[in-house]
Image (cartoon, grey):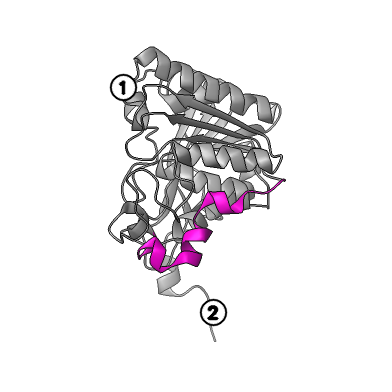
Amino acid sequence: MTASGPSLRELIAAPHPDHAPLPSGTPGEPGVRELRGVPYGNVEGSRPLELDLWLPEAVQEEPLPLVLFVHGGAWRRGRRDDMGMRTRHWIPRPFARIAAAGLAVACVDYRLSGEATFPAPLDDLRAALRWLTLRSEELGIDTGRTVVWGESAGGHLASLLALTHADPPLAGAVIWYAPSDLTTVRGGFAPDDAATPEGVMLGRAPSAAPELARAASPLVHVHSGAPPFLLVHGEQDTMVDCSHSQSLAAALDGARAPVELRTVPGADHGWHGLPDAQVEEIFTHALAFARRIVA
């Protein structure tokens, strides 16, 4: 009798992300090494979930703090390596700049609203952080010093992750022009409309599922043990009303959690309307915040 071994189905399948070999990485922009398209999760019936990593090229003596970046796109589109329209022409690119400053960067996929509804995208971020922790020794990173950084819809998910993830707890959050409340009318958002990006993300009008809308609202999850937040929002934002960040900042401050709120006069969503130099300054300020809280 022959010994049993893996089935043909198991042999055909790609190695599980938990133990699949890491790519060797390629030199990117000066001083930076890139690992692109690294699988971190398998979801039954869905595409493989991947992330990109930017790491300083020089060998580090100590594990690096991590920036976990979450892209925007109204929860239904977007690319994991896109920090927004105003940074797409930058050389060096924004993630290369973060890595050159001594932080690892992981830009992660999450399931979009055409693929799965909430809480699937938040579950995916948790899975990415679990995988990064599991493979941290190989990658030379310290996920106990993770700053989550998100813009727009990605900022909404990043806020939820920072406020609700406990193992490991996050070190901080950088949130650009993101929704914080899916339960009330704000700007052009109407919670009784299932066709809004928020409604599509939830799978129904927020007002028709009040408990789900509350669960998806960072404002509801504020607590005194929240990590430091940097909230930056354009005062003329026509897509996500500035009151979202103002309310979240007020709630964090009321809970005695550390928060810095910066509203930007003349800025619409995605920093539209600002001169390039001011967008650069906003990025530089956010990077300095991230470096300070993981020092």
Instruction: Answer few, some or many: residues within 10 Å of disc 1's Cα (few below 14, many 20 plus, some between 14 and 19).
Output: some
Residue 220 located left or right of residue 294: left
Q: Residue furthest bottom?
A: 1
- Per the rendered image, the range of residues in magenta is 202-224
Residue in the image at 32% along x and 26% along y: 272
Please determine whether, in this image, residue 19 is positioned above or below residue 140: below
Residue at image mark 1:
273
Tell me, yes or no, whether the highlighted magenta stretch contains residue 175: no
Q: Amino acid at mark 1?
A: Gly
61 or 196, nearer to the observer: 196
- The residue located at (44%, 25%) in the rendering is 94
Residue 145 visible within the image: no
Magenta-colored segment: predominant secondary structure: helix
- Residue 168 drawn at (x, y percent): 68, 49
- Residue at 51% x, 48% y is 21
Q: Is residue 203 magenta?
A: yes
Question: In the structure shown, which secondary structural element does the residue marked by tag 2 occupy?
Answer: loop
Where is residue 29 shown, x and y percent of the image? 43, 21
Front residue of this view, candidates 142 and 115:
115
Quarter containing the N terminus: bottom right
Mark 2, other Cα within 10 Å: few <14 / some 14–19 / many ≥20: few
Residue type (three-letter) at the residue carrying disc 2: Ser
Q: Is residue 18 visible?
A: yes
Q: Position of residue 203 (x, y in %)?
A: 36, 65
Distance from disc 2 to disc 1, alpha carbons, whole Å, reads 65 Å
Label whose residue precedes the other's in the sequence (2 or 1): 2
Which residue is located at x 56 percent, y 79 percent? 3
> Nearest the camera: 24 or 68?
68
Q: Quadrant of the C terminus?
A: top right
Q: Which residue is mark 2?
A: 4
Q: Considering only vertical position in the picture, is 21 above or below 62?
A: below
Mark 1: secondary structure:
loop
